[in-house]
Amino acid sequence: MTADRLLALAMAALMVTAGLAVATPVAAADGDAITVQTADATDVTASDATLQGNLTHVTDTVTSADVAVTYWEAGDPANNTTVDAGELTATGEFSAHATGLDNGTTYAYRATAEANGTAVEGSVVEFTTADREIALDVATEPPTNVTDTAATLVANLTELDDAATDASVSFQYWVEGDRSSKEKVELDANGTGTYTAAVENLTAGETYVVRAHAETGASDVNYTADDRGAELTFTTGTGEFGVTTGDASDVTNSSATLNGDLTGLNGSADASVGFEYYPEGDAANASSVDAGERSSVGAFSAEVTGLDNGTTYVYTATASADNATVVGENVTFTPGASDDGPTYEATSRSGSGSSMSSVV
């Protein structure tokens, strides 16, 4: 209730007490249904900025207000650009991102709001873009050393400004489909190159998303630059020692690449992986090929040569660790060549996955 309203009521009460006639006081006007303020711009770089506004008042008659920000080069308001900032159902702050700005240029802007056919504007605020862009580029690399519950996250800082100060590289990772589970690991950056961070206590058999992020300032410009790498996924081991057989690839009339996937280590530090293969129906004459040692779950492969053209082969992936061996399902392929070059006849598979046997 306004001071004028309180004064009117008090005077009326005195007049009634004195026995004087008095007219009913007139209610004070509600004022504007909405009001908006313009706040200072943030995250100003050489080419973009975040423009801020605040919806400061909403009456009961307003169910929602459309908010936006309009900006222009200082001194030229006729050539303006409006960026939608969404819809608010209550008072609160809002922002809009202005991009494609000219470096070293002063811009003016104001916040706006519209509700029930009434439009209001905030005051005009100015900001000046930085004189130049800060050079910064980071890439997310595939994680390494992925086990049942741990992984090493990898980033490559490929560009860092010569005048950079307080540079940092960080990783964000989360369970795929659940960004609320996001975790962050921060590292100091001393120059371009590879940065790694070991993370533990992951959930076995879970797919995670990881993204690298870099941030730095520069001694000659007054803003902080940041860059984000692509989002990559990786899957932890199942918690059980296991291997699967993949489809053969790069099949010619006499060679092929055999593919497998180590799906879990069950606490083992590493596993020896490889393949066994033989002409279909002749398992007694099986050959084996080594695919090396793996200390993390993931794909592995090996090339086999000297195959007979037109003969169907059966192969399976194998893994051995801590006196135990697991094998994947059987997969078949048939080398063959046509006039157009190598062809890969249909692969078929049998079996239901890994089986384990003890090795004494």
Image: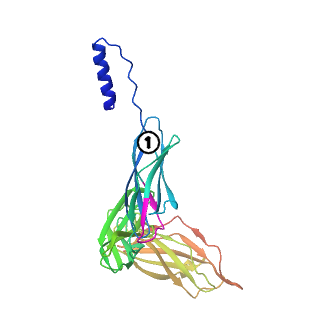
Question: What residue is drawn where x is 49% and y is 74%?
Answer: 260
The correct choice, above or below, for 257 with respect to 45 in the image is: below
Total marks in image = 1
Kindly give the residue lying farthest to the top in the view shown.
19
Question: What residue is drawn where x is 33% and y is 32%?
Answer: 2
Q: Residue type at mark 1: give it.
A: Ile
The correct choice, above or below, for 203 with respect to 339 in the image is: above
Q: Which residue is mark 1?
A: 34
User: In the rendered structure, which segment of residues is drawn in magenta?
Assistant: 95-108
Q: Position of residue 219 (x, y in %)?
A: 30, 75
Which image quadrant is residue 215 in? bottom left
Q: Position of residue 33 (x, y in %)?
A: 45, 39
Magenta stretch: includes residue 217:
no
Instruction: Using the image as rendered, state which of residue 258 and residue 42 is in the foreground.
Output: 42
Magenta stretch: includes residue 96:
yes
Q: Position of residue 169 (x, y in %)?
A: 34, 71
Instruction: Using the image as rendered, state which of residue 28 and residue 61 is in the foreground.
Output: 28
Quadrant in which the N terminus is drawn: top left
User: Is residue 268 visible to us here?
Assistant: no
Image side of residue 272 versus residue 218, left or right: right
Pointer 1 local density, CA inside 10 Å: few below 14, some 14–19, many at least 20: many
Image side of residue 162 versus residue 254, left or right: left
Instruction: Using the image as rendered, state which of residue 273 and residue 198 is in the foreground.
Output: 198
Image side of residue 335 versus residue 297, left or right: right
Quadrant in which the C terminus is drawn: bottom left
Kindly give the residue lying farthest to the right in the view shown.
339
Which image quadrant is residue 332 in? bottom right
Q: Position of residue 109 (x, y in %)?
A: 43, 58
Q: Secondary structure at mark 1?
A: strand
User: Is residue 59 visible to us here?
Assistant: yes
